[in-house]
Every structure is written in C-alpha cells, then in structure tokens.
C-alpha cells in the first residue's frame, strides 16, 4: 500500500539534545513538507522540498534542519536551538500535479 | 498571512447542516480543506483551484469565491463521524509551496 510513514509515533528527549524525525513516502511524490502543530492551533510550515537536494525554509524554520537526499525521504532534525520543541510534527507530500497534500500520521515530540 | 476561519466552534445535532468559512486578505490560487480528529493527522477533504477546478468528496461542497478570496465548506445532513476540527489551508501561487493554515473550526455533532 502506498502512503506516508513517520516514526516514531511518540518521542521523548531531554532539553539540549538534537533529535531527528523520520518521514518516508512511497507515493512517488516530488514535493514533501514538514509542519508543526501546537495544542489548539493550526499547522505551521517549517520546511519544504520540491525536488531532491533542494529545500526551502517555511514560516518557522529557526532551530530546525532538513535534508532531501532521496525522493522518498525527508528527515527533520530538531536542534537544541529550537526554544519550544514540544509539539506534534506532521510530514506531508504532494501529488505530481503539485496540488493536494496528504499527511503522514505524525510524531508527537516531548522535550523536558 | 494566515486565513481567518469562522466560526471557531459549532455544535449541531446529527442530520443538521454546517457551514465553515475561510477568508484571506491575499489573492489565492487554491484553497484546501482538511478534517482532523483529536491526536490524528489531518485528512484531505477538498481542493479548490482558481479558475473553478475542484476535487474532493461527493458529500462535501466548498465554493471558492475568487473575487472575495473566500471559501465556505458546506456539510449537509451531518453524521456523527463529521465531528472534528476543520482546517482550511491556502496557497497564493500555483507551484508546490507549503500551505498557510487557519486556526481551525471545531465541529461537534451530537446524536
């Protein structure tokens, strides 16, 4: 079955540690995205990539980094520079016509 | 700029109709509607494109008023499963940029 997978579902880290969230898709989508959602809030764009080896900052990129070495994979690193990293992180990918976006199940990150 | 959704919350009885609004101060190329259940990922409902093209579910309609940069999501004969938070996401260009989401509308359907 085609889809977007994110792992792990829940992640706990100590403050000051970097952590990498995984996102894989087998939908043959060119574009991939990372969003952050805080309780009771909408989604905010962190980074996106329209093609392998290329990515652009979104609205809240500070304290995050990404890579896009393969079409199928778009990992997100939450660095120690991110002041409020605790959130629900959602990865999405976009159809070849670059229109509707589909989301993975998300990773809930808690940093204490 | 973030689109504005209204109302913030609505409670309905099963079988009633619901309307959720999304408006932007920027010229839009597309409007995307999603529904999210608590703790889960958003589920794609509809996409509306400048020029009138749209794609989505049969039981949901969401006209796109290009002049006013607005879209309204119409849910008819609501079912219990319609409960959740509805988000609109907007895009100003025709490329593959990310979406800008509103803060959401909480919909509760009671038996």
Image (spheres, grey):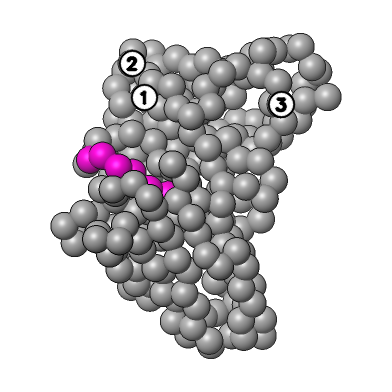
The answer to whether mark 2 and mark 1 are in CB contact below 8 A is yes
Residue A17: % across, % down: 73, 12
What residue is pinned by disc 3? A84
Label of residue B102 in the image = none
Residue B57 sits above or below residue B94 on the image: below
In the image shown, does A64 or B91 lie closer to the viewer? Answer: B91
Residue A8 sits above or below residue B24 on the image: above
Report the magenta residues as a range: B89-94
Quarter of the figure with residue A6: top right
Q: Chain ID for label 2?
A: A
Q: Chain ID for label 1?
A: A
Does residue B91 belong to the magenta stretch? yes
Residue A53: % across, % down: 33, 13
Q: Residue at x 26, y 39 (%)?
A: B93
**Quarter in which the N terminus of chain A is drawn:** top left
Q: Chain ID for label 3?
A: A
Earlier sequence position, callout 2 versus callout 1 = 1
Q: Residue at x 70, y 21 (%)?
A: A83
């Amino acid at each position: 079955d085609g889809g977007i997978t994110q792992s792990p579902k829940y992640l706990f880290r100590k403050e000051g540690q970097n952590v990498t969230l995984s996102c894989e898709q087998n939908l043959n989508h060119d574009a991939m995205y990372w969003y952050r959602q805080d309780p009771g809030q909408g989604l905010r764009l962190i980074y996106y990539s329209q093609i392998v080896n290329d990515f652009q900052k979104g609205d809240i990129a500070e304290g995050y980094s990404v890579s896009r070495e393969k079409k199928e994979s778009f990992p997100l690193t939450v660095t120690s520079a991110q002041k409020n990293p605790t959130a629900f992180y959602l990865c999405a990918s976009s159809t070849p016509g670059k229109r509707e976006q589909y989301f993975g199940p998300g990773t809930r990150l808690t940093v204490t | 700029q973030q689109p504005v959704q209204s109302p913030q919350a609505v409670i309905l009885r099963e079988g009633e109709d619901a309307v959720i609004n999304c408006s932007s101060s920027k010229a839009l190329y597309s409007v995307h509607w999603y529904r999210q259940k608590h703790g889960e990922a958003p589920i794609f409902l509809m996409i509306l494109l400048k020029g009138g093209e749209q794609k989505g579910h049969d039981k949901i309609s969401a006209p796109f008023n290009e002049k006013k940069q607005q879209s309204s999501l119409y849910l008819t004969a609501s079912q219990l499963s319609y409960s959740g938070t509805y988000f609109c996401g907007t895009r100003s260009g025709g490329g593959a940029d990310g979406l800008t989401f509103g803060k959401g509308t909480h919909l509760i359907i009671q038996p």
